[in-house]
Image: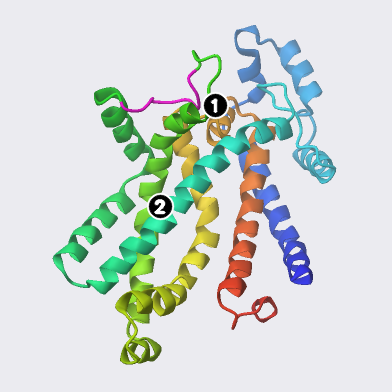
Amino acid sequence: MLSYIVRRILQAIPSLIGISIITFILLHIVPGNPVRILLGQHYTPQRAAALAQSLGLNKPLYMQYLIWLWNILHGNLGYSYNYTEPVTYLIGHALPNTLSLVLIATIFAQLFAMLIGTVQAYFENTIADHIITVLNYFFYSMPSFWLGILMVMFFSIQLHWFPSGGVVNPQDPNPGFWDWLHHLILPAATLTLVTLAGYSRYMRSSVRETLLMDYVRTARAKGLRESQVLWRHVLRNSVLPQITLFGLSFPALFAGALFIEEIFNYPGMGLLYWNAVGTLDYPVLLGVTMFLGALTIIGNLLADILYSLVDPRISLESMS
């Protein structure tokens, strides 16, 4: 397994380099000048030239990229223009909040998707199946930022059940776990709802196909209870597509969290990214983009490993 993981990481290096080149070029051709944004009303040609030289923005574009690539190979993502802090520090400070949001949303989305998809497949073409299908399409087609706004308006502004943003109460000198959880519920519920719809549709199709398999009919013919058939034979084989979907959609969950964190003013990587967009903070934008690129590769690798653990018939060597 170790040799397979090392081989996959080495194969991913050219992809990461390609992502970095494309991202670097696209960021630098976007209209706007970070030097002018940073100086604001204090802009003068002399100050702009001095600041551009200190930031290395006066060099040719290919030279800027090579310097950035050399630094990143040594673990240095550069310094933020806006925060004057190392990008690694900013990402490390924001990452735990985003990870907690994404992991909680993923766990609940997967669990509810298994339950809802199984119920839909077992009671196929019933009223319950049709109602759940309509709700799935409703949440699947709804943009995450719009759903987040609706959640804030209803649960925060109208009902006053949950805070509208933040990660803890800033007026509480000693915020605890429950305060953190209270602030996390709304953004996590929003991300769960927009993710659940896609997961449950895949689970419904997988369970429906599994219910028609010969080994399921054989298990029923042996006299096993229906709960045993579903748990032992149907769910275990139906969950394999969910693992693939999880590996592929894990980076998309982070991308969805970017919008949700902006809506809820949640201090994660999403809010860090949006603040960097407003000031054309190249080091932060590049650092977050490269992190998401690496996360895509890690998600695919994690899906392969989980596949081999869930289904003994599949080995990592057979997927290489």
Indicate the secondary structure of the residue bearing disc 1. Answer: helix
Task: Check disc 2 and report the residue beneath it.
Answer: 195
Q: Is residue 144 above or below residue 83?
A: below
Residue extent of the magenta highlight: 161-169
Residue 163 relative to residue 85: left or right? left
Give residue 27's position: percent from left, percent from top. 62, 38
Give residue 202's position: percent from left, percent from top. 38, 67
Quadrant of the rendered image containing residue 32? top right
Comparing 251 with 96, the one in front is 96
Give residue 311's position: percent from left, percent from top. 56, 77
Q: Residue at x 67, y 46 (%)?
A: 290
Quadrant of the rendered image containing residue 162? top left
Q: Amino acid at mark 2?
A: Thr
Nearer the observer, disc 1 or disc 2? 2
Q: Is residue 164 magenta?
A: yes
Q: Is residue 68 above or below residue 311?
A: above
Comparing 221 with 127, the one in front is 221
Q: Is residue 137 magenta?
A: no
Q: Amino acid at mark 1?
A: Gly
Task: Check disc 1 and report the residue beneath it.
Answer: 278
Q: Is residue 198 above or below residue 181?
A: below
